[in-house]
Amino acid sequence: ILTILEFPDKRLRTVASEVEQVDAGIKKLVDDMIETMYSAKGVGLAATQVNVHKRVIVMDVSENKDDPICLINPQIVERDGVEESEEGCLSVPGFFEKVSRAEHIKVKALDRNGDSFELEARDLLAVCIQHEMDHLEGKLFVDYLSPFKRNRIKAKLDKIHRAQGHQG
Ligand SMILES: O=C(O)C[C@@H](Cc1ccccc1)[C@H](O)SCc1ccccc1
Ligand SMILES: [Zn+2]
């Protein structure tokens, strides 16, 4: 199980770099991220959130939580429509706010074996992919909120981290 960084940790703002080679190390990272995602009850997780700055995301939007998807070096090749939905984030625990995203997307990526594939997504899967791909750019869903709301969330999480004895 890997440790998930929490807002406003600066490391969440790192822009992740492309995976050159899907080797054993990347496969281990994917397995560790999937295990961490399930244990945290998330439907998605980006490598940035576990302080590994590589373009790797995992997600599982299935009912029985038995269909994990891994996207390596994901690129959105098509997007259309706009849809607003309530978002949460394992790095911003306890807060849920409305965010607008593209309603339908087409994504190109490498899978866990390094093979290229294309995925078409709508609804929760589309929201999750866009949310996770933002993480790889150092972007969080709170960045779409007003400075007032974002600062209020930052203040509340800072207070919790101080009580837990986090550095900085
Ligand atoms: O990236 C993360 O932190 C995991 C996110 C993924 C996600 C965000 C917004 C909408 C869908 C997925 C969540 O924390 S997983 C928890 C969750 C589950 C269902 C709906 C919203 C949030
Ligand atoms: Zn998130």
Image (cartoon, rainbow, N blue to C red):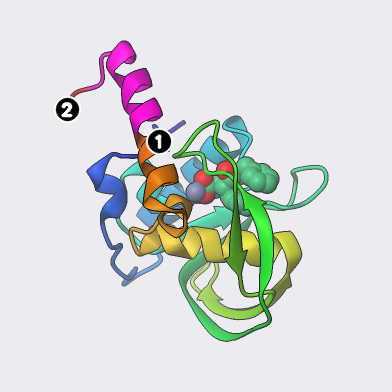
Q: Quadrant of the C terminus?
A: top left
Q: Please name the amino acid that badge 2 sits on.
A: Gly
**Left or right side of 47 for 115:** right
Instruction: For label 2, count other residues whose C-alpha is less than 10 Å away and answer few (under 14), some (14-19) or many (20+).
Output: few
The span shown in magenta is 155-166
Q: Please name the amino acid that badge 1 sits on.
A: Arg
Residue displayed at 69% across by 74% down: 103
**Left or right side of 138 for 40:** right
Mark closer to the observer (2, 1): 1
Label 2 – label 1 distance at C-alpha: 18 Å
Q: Position of residue 141 (x, y in %)?
A: 48, 54
Residue on which disc 2 sits: 168
Observer-nearest of 41 and 167 = 167
Q: Main secondary structure of the magenta part?
A: helix
Q: Position of residue 155 (x, y in %)?
A: 34, 30
Which mark is on residue 152? 1
Q: Secondary structure at mark 1?
A: helix
